[in-house]
Amino acid sequence: VPDALCELAQAVLASPRLAAQLNSAQRKALIAKLLQKRSWADCAQLLNLAGRRQVEALLREAVRCITMKHPHNPA
């Protein structure tokens, strides 16, 4: 998992305002995969998903949710 995604997860979860924009499953996925470094199988089981593809989709959805609402404005 790229370091940038781990940093994004830390920033989002440290901010109650940003964390509130994600649903419970999205927050759990960020914590389990990006911060706790759990296996794809463990994450899928925790989230009651079929497997890695579904966990990846949930993580993409979470990242999209955050980046769409807070786009980066390069200087």
Image (spheres, grey):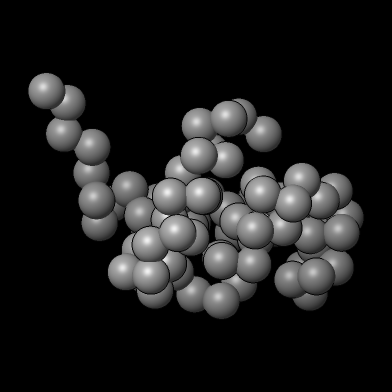
| Quadrant of the image occupied by residue 14 | bottom left
Q: Is residue 5 above or below residue 28?
A: above
Residue 74 against residue 67 in the figure, above or below: above
Rendering coords of residue 64 (x, y %) = 40, 51
Q: Residue at coordinates 81% horizontally, 51% vertically from top-left?
A: 38
- The percent position of residue 63, horizontal first and vertical second, equals 45, 50
Q: The N terminus appears in which quarter of the rendering?
A: top right
Residue 17: x %, y % from top left: 32, 69
Residue 2 x/y as whole percent: 60, 29
Total numbered circles: 0
Given the current orientation, which residue lies at the most extreme left position?
A: 75
- Left or right: 55, with 6 as reference point: right
Q: Is residue 50 visible?
A: no
- In the picture, the quarter occupied by the C terminus is top left
Residue nearest the viewer, comparing 15 with 22:
15
Q: Is residue 5 above or below residue 35?
A: above
Seen at 88% across and 55% down, the residue is 41
Q: Could you tell me which residue is drawn at 51 percent across and 49 percent down?
A: 10
- Residue at the extreme front of the image, as rendered: 14
- Report whether 11 appears left or right of 33: left
- Residue 44 visible? The answer is yes
Q: Which residue is nearer to you in this view: 53 or 69?
A: 69
Between 60 and 9, the one lying in front of the other is: 9
Corner quadrant of residue 32: bottom right
Q: Is residue 23 left or right of residue 43?
A: left
Q: Which residue is rendered at x = 25% and y = 56% of the image?
A: 69
